[in-house]
Amino acid sequence: MKKKDVLLKALKCAFPYTLPILAGFWFLGFAYGYLMNVSGFSFVYPLVMSICIFGGSLEFVAVSMLLSAFAPLQTVIMALMIQARHLFYGISMLDKYRGMGWKKFYLVYAMCDESFSINFTADIPQDVDRGWFYFFVSLLDQSYWVSGALLGALFGDLVHFNTKGLDFIMTAMFVTIFAEQWMKEKRHFSELAGFASGVIALVVFGPQRFMIPAMAGILALLYIFRRLVEKMWETGEDTE
């Protein structure tokens, strides 16, 4: 098969998976670009930041950081706390991204919550190149965010609306992904492990600090019971 056909098949396979991300990222990206505009920044700022940072929560927080006094150490600590969950995503994707060549560098750079969810759970057909599938999922997701941020910045002077509540779009999207995974499996060990870790961490550490402990709990449970999970997948007991 020609390389062009390989790329096209991977792109066609990846695109439908990213359609929910398209809706969420365009809305939130537009809100972010709009916020940057009304805060007095040129469209260049949200464009460059969405390309270089590519972290929605951090980019929203970065607006107030840019308007505050210069505090590099505080900025580094804040960025690490907000994006630290990606460390756990990366550990989970070590095997999947192994042997991807130069694409691995972009896959690591462009990993976000949404691309991780798709690339980790997607049922990729055998005739589709996995590396290019992962690549196009990440590229499409980032392009949605960048284009949404740019549109919001460009039309910020013309469009005026209250952006409060728009962040619920991402919550709704993750609920949908969770429901799909729940219906796909029979034993639901991974879903229950994630749910239990999240609830316990939320109760113990509170809504502002529960993310990293929750991810650590999920990782610990999957590591402790990894042989059981692997056995269920090998025997087909965990899937329909």
Image (cartoon, helix red, strand yellow):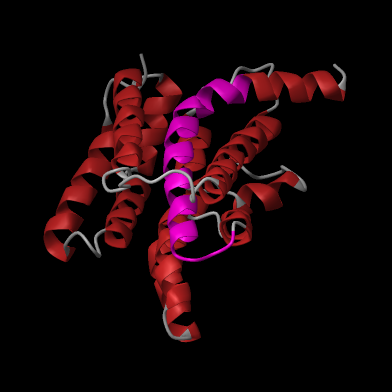
Inspect the magenta stretch and tell me whether residue 40 lies in it: yes
Residue farthest to the front?
158
Q: Is residue 136 left or right of residue 226?
A: right
Residue 50 appears anywhere in the view: yes
Q: Give 23 or 162, whichever is nearer the viewer.
A: 162
Residue 138 falls in image quadrant: top right
Quadrant including the C terminus: top left
The relative height of residue 116 versus residue 184 in the rendered view (above or below) is: below
Residue farthest to the top?
240
Q: Is residue 67 left or right of residue 166?
A: right
Residue 78 falls in image quadrant: bottom left
The relative height of residue 98 versus residue 213 in the rendered view (above or below) is: above
Residue 128 coordinates in the image, percent (x, y): 68, 21
Which residue occupies 49% across, 36% down? 120
Residue 84 appears anywhere in the view: no
- Name the dominant secondary structure of the magenta segment: helix
Residue 27 coordinates in the image, percent (x, y): 43, 39
Q: Give 59 or 42, whichever is nearer the viewer.
A: 42
Q: Which residues are magenta?
A: 13-42
Q: Give 229 or 88, whichever is nearer the viewer.
A: 88
Q: Give 57 or 112, whichever is nearer the viewer.
A: 57
Which residue occupies 59% across, 56% down? 43
Residue 166 coordinates in the image, percent (x, y): 32, 42
Residue 234 falls in image quadrant: top left
Residue 86 coordinates in the image, percent (x, y): 46, 56
The relative height of residue 232 versus residue 208 in the rendered view (above or below) is: above
Which residue occupies 66% across, 37% down? 135
Inspect the magenta stretch and tell me whether residue 22 lies in it: yes
Quadrant including the N terminus: top right
Residue farthest to the left?
203
Q: Is residue 81 left or right of residue 183?
A: right
